[in-house]
């Protein structure tokens, strides 16, 4: 084998080595980007879940009492989730999961519009029952969605899952599930009564 062949082989090996080093670096960086993203955002979502549970627990009373006018009023501030405020590499996520996380703020905005409509057009003083029901239902739904997203992030980032709570500990996720089921049942019963009343009116007309 002449000198030229040795030089050519050396060049080829050098190119392959550089390509491998570049692949290894990018692969290592992508893994670190994904790990940081999943840790950071799952923790933020956990905080959001707790905030949603706080909203669901808000019955409009302060220490069991209405305000000075005898009205129920919102006691708990709604939580916020702004994923684009965090400096993470979103492209490290699969497209579907990235879409789910980044679209959550739009779902929060839509929920707030529904809550506003319930308080403005359906609820009446002093209890504003329909308004508080809608607020609890919307934030229970958002909280459960955020919990599901946090679980997906932990799975894809190969992170430890949340430690199971002891039976005597307050479980925000279970609390929101039970609250949503209860409100859904109440709303169904109210709709049934409303339909029955409308039918009676139509029959007597």
Image: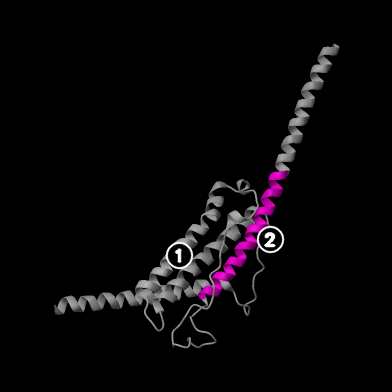
Residue placed at 52% from the left, 72% from the top? Answer: 176
Q: Quadrant of the C terminus?
A: bottom left
Q: Give the extent of the magenta segment.
A: 29-56
Query: How busy is the neighbourhood of tag 1: few (under 14 within 10 Å), some, or many (20 plus)?
Result: some
- Can you give x and y, in whole percent of width and height, for residue 70 in the image? 44, 88
x and y, in percent, of residue 44 in the image: 63, 62
Which quarter shows the N terminus? top right
- Secondary-structure class at tag 2: loop
Q: Secondary structure at mark 1?
A: helix
Residue in the image at 39% along x and 76% along y:
130
Give 157 or 76, whichever is nearer the viewer. Answer: 76
Question: Residue at coordinates 57% horizontally, 73% vertically from top-left?
Answer: 172
Q: Image check: 126 left or right of 47?
A: left
In the image, residue 88 lies in the stretch drawn in magenta = no
The percent coordinates of residue 14 (x first, y second) are 79, 26
Give the farthest residue toward the top. Answer: 2
Q: Main secondary structure of the magenta part?
A: helix
**Where is 71 relative to 84, above or below?**
below
Above-or-below relation of 59 to 141: below
Q: Residue at x 79, y 21 (%)?
A: 11
Give the farthest residue toward the front: 68
Tell which of 6 and 61 is nearer to you: 61
* Residue assigned mark 2: 160
Q: CA distance from mark 1 to mark 2?
A: 31 Å
- Can you say whether 8 is above or below 72 in the image? above
Whether the residues at callouts 1 and 2 have beta carbons within 8 Å, the answer is no
**Which label belongs to residue 111?**
1
Residue 90 higher or lower than 25, as above or below: below
Q: What percent of the width, then of the height, locates residue 120?
A: 38, 72
Q: Which mark is first along the chain, 2 or 1?
A: 1
Q: Nearer the viewer, residue 179 or 120?
A: 120
């Amino acid at each position: 084998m002449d000198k030229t062949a040795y030089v050519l082989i050396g060049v080829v090996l050098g190119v392959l080595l550089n390509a491998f080093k570049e692949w290894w670096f990018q692969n290592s960086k992508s893994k670190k980007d994904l790990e940081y993203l999943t840790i950071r955002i799952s923790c933020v979502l956990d905080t959001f879940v707790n905030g949603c549970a706080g909203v669901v627990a808000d019955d409009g009373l302060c220490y069991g009492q209405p305000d000075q006018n005898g009205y129920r009023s919102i006691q708990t501030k709604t939580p916020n989730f702004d994923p684009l405020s965090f400096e993470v590499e979103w492209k490290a996520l699969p497209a579907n999961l990235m879409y789910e996380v980044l679209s959550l703020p739009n779902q929060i905005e839509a929920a707030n519009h529904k809550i506003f409509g319930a308080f403005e057009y359906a609820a009446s003083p002093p209890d504003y029952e329909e308004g508080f029901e809608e607020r609890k239902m919307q934030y229970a739904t958002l909280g459960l969605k955020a919990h599901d997203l946090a679980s997906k992030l932990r799975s894809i980032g190969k992170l430890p899952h949340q430690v199971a709570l002891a039976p005597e500990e307050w479980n925000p996720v279970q609390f929101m599930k039970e609250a949503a089921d209860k409100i859904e049942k109440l709303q169904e019963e109210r709709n049934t009564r409303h339909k029955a009343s409308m039918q009676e009116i139509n029959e007597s007309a």
